[in-house]
Image (cartoon, grey):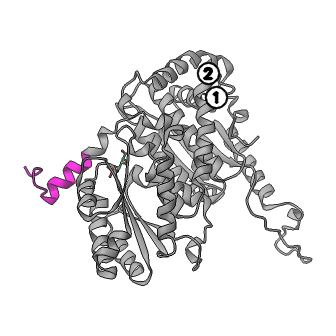
């Protein structure tokens, strides 16, 4: 079937049916709290119905902006931080070639990122690149006042205006922000930029299926209709079924909460295909910001295997027993490479002849899971039939829905992030921002 599913075979020593049945009612109450909008943070539930309710006009506008800009820009700069860039990057990097940056004449621009760092060297190197290539920009900020993207946009806007003149620069800028408020909203109005709105009731880390994620993903040449279709199909499964067997989001939330209560305080999201690295980065924000509060919450961590088996594998196998693993397990690759035969067999790997790289990788995955299980680590597998837009849409909605249910089961408000403000106040005071000095 072309649907993601959970495999709990390697959890059996750690989570039993009695425990799952025991938490089921709690999970159903949390699901009801989420879907009825009766819990804390209920003014940020717009993401629940996005796949169904996103207006076709927005999709058409995104597609027409892609057609308008794609032949005029070799590079497309996405300016944003946290929830205003991680979702787009996660999908784009999952789908694109690892070597996409080397392709000089693609049909769509190559996406690069800014506003997620304050490193001077990063911007120096970026400007050198923007000197050489035609480019366009999406500046994304829900509040419209976040320092990192504001600094990046001021630098890049000035570069763009110097390169193309003010009128053409304005044609190459798209602003994605609040409908009514914020500095970015005001700049976009005054300069006449093309704008898209981030709905009031969708928080940053749940915004990938709004123009925040859809515009950059479409600009990179990927099929946002399929992405939304995947999310729609997963939404149906997550909202309609109350069964732990049929509803993967309920089962995932149940397993996480059972393990957390037993002292497994760290969840490591793992992949065996490097393209999924930024899915982990997006997931870490989603779960870290949603659950890490009030002195509670599973610490989300991530590793890419087999690469990290040669660095962190030792700790997972024999270090302190505080983690469980969730493996993103891809069944069907998109490409094919044969291992050539070699008569001399000096490297001793002729025994692999006739096996695909995927088969070898799958055995590395199973070998790892069995070893970690023996070392006392519970392992859950999320089986992905393949990595395409449709499956990624499913995965996004699955993680979002499970996050809401899991957060309410933990007893926190999964939709606020009060802790993110603390560093900003100190930074503003240290930099002498008006209103923040002692
Ligand atoms: O999830 C969140 O709310 C945050 O990570 C924000 O996305 C991030 O701080 C960027 O905020 P903004 O979009 O307002 O610039």
Q: Is residue 170 visible?
A: yes
**Crowd tier of the residue under label 1, counting other residues whose Cα lies within 10 Å: few below 14, some 14–19, many 20 or above:** many
Marks 1 and 2, how far apart in space? 7 Å
Give percent across and percent down for residue 45: 42, 33
Can you say whether 204 is above or below 219 in the image? above
Above or below residue 363? Residue 245 is above
Cβ of mark 1 under 8 Å from ligand 1: the answer is: no
Residue 242: image tag: 2
- Mark yes or no: residue 314 visible: no
Query: Would you place residue 119 above or below residue 406 in this image?
Result: below
Q: Which image quarter: residue 341?
A: bottom right
Looking at the rendering, in which quadrant would you find the N terminus? top right
Q: Residues within 10 Å of mark 2 (few under 14, many from 20)?
A: some
Question: Which quarter of the picture shows residue 166?
Answer: bottom left
The stretch drawn in magenta includes residue 432: yes
The image quadrant of residue 195 is bottom left
Give me the residue at 53% from left, 40% from top: 51
Q: Position of residue 198 (x, y in %)?
A: 38, 47
Q: Are marks 1 and 2 in contact (CB under 8 Å)?
A: yes
Q: Is residue 116 left or right of residue 306?
A: left
Indicate the position of residue 417 as horizontal and vertical percent values.
34, 39
Q: Residue at x 36, y 78 (%)?
A: 127
Residue lying at 88% horizontally and 65% vertically, measured from the top left: 353
Q: Is residue 209 above or below residue 401?
A: below
User: For residue 247, which numbered disc appears in the image?
Assistant: 1
Point out the stretch of residues depicted in magenta. 422-438
Queried whether the magenta region covers residue 365, the answer comes back as no
Q: Residue at x 30, y 74 (%)?
A: 167
Element under disc 1 = loop
């Amino acid at each position: 079937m072309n649907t993601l599913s959970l495999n709990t075979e390697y959890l059996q020593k750690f989570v039993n049916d009695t425990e799952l049945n025991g938490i089921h009612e709690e999970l159903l109450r949390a699901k009801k709290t989420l879907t009825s909008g009766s819990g804390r943070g209920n003014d940020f539930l717009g993401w629940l119905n996005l796949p169904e309710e996103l207006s076709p006009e927005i999709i058409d506008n995104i597609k027409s902006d892609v057609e308008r800009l794609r032949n005029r820009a070799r590079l497309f700069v996405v300016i944003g931080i946290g929830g205003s860039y991680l979702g787009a990057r996660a999908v784009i990097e999952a789908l694109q070639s690892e070597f996409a940056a080397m392709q000089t004449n693609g049909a769509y621009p190559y996406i690069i990122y800014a506003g997620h760092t304050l490193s001077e060297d990063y911007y120096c190197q970026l400007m050198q690149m923007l000197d050489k290539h035609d480019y366009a920009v999406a500046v994304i900020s829900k509040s419209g006042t976040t320092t990192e993207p504001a600094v990046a946009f001021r630098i890049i806007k000035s570069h763009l205006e110097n390169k193309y003149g003010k009128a053409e620069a304005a044609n190459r800028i798209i602003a994605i922000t609040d409908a009514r408020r914020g500095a970015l909203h005001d700049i976009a109005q005054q300069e006449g930029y093309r704008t898209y709105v981030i709905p009031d009731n969708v928080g940053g880390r749940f915004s990938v299926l709004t123009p925040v994620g859809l515009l950059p993903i479409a600009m990179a040449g990927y099929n946002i209709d399929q992405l939304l279709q995947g999310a729609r199909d997963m939404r149906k499964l997550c909202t309609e079924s109350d069964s732990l067997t049929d509803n993967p989001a309920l089962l995932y939330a149940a397993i996480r909460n059972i393990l957390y209560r037993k002292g497994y305080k760290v969840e490591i999201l793992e992949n065996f295909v490097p393209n999924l690295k930024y899915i982990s980065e997006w997931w870490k924000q989603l779960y870290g910001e949603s659950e890490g509060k009030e002195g509670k919450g599973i610490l989300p961590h991530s590793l890419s295997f087999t690469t990290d088996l040669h660095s962190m594998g030792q700790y997972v196998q024999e270090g302190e027993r505080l983690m469980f693993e969730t493996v993103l397990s891809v069944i069907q690759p998109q490409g094919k490479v044969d291992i050539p035969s070699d008569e001399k067999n000096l490297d001793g790997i002729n025994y692999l002849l006739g096996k695909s790289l995927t088969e070898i990788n799958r055995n590395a995955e199973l070998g790892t899971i069995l070893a970690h299980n023996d070392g006392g680590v519970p392992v859950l597998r999320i089986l992905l039939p393949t990595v395409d837009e449709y499956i990624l849409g499913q995965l996004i909605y699955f993680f979002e829905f499970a996050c809401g249910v899991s957060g309410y089961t933990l007893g926190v408000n999964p939709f606020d992030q009060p802790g993110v403000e603390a560093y900003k106040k100190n930074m503003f005071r240290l930099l002498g921002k008006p209103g923040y000095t002692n």
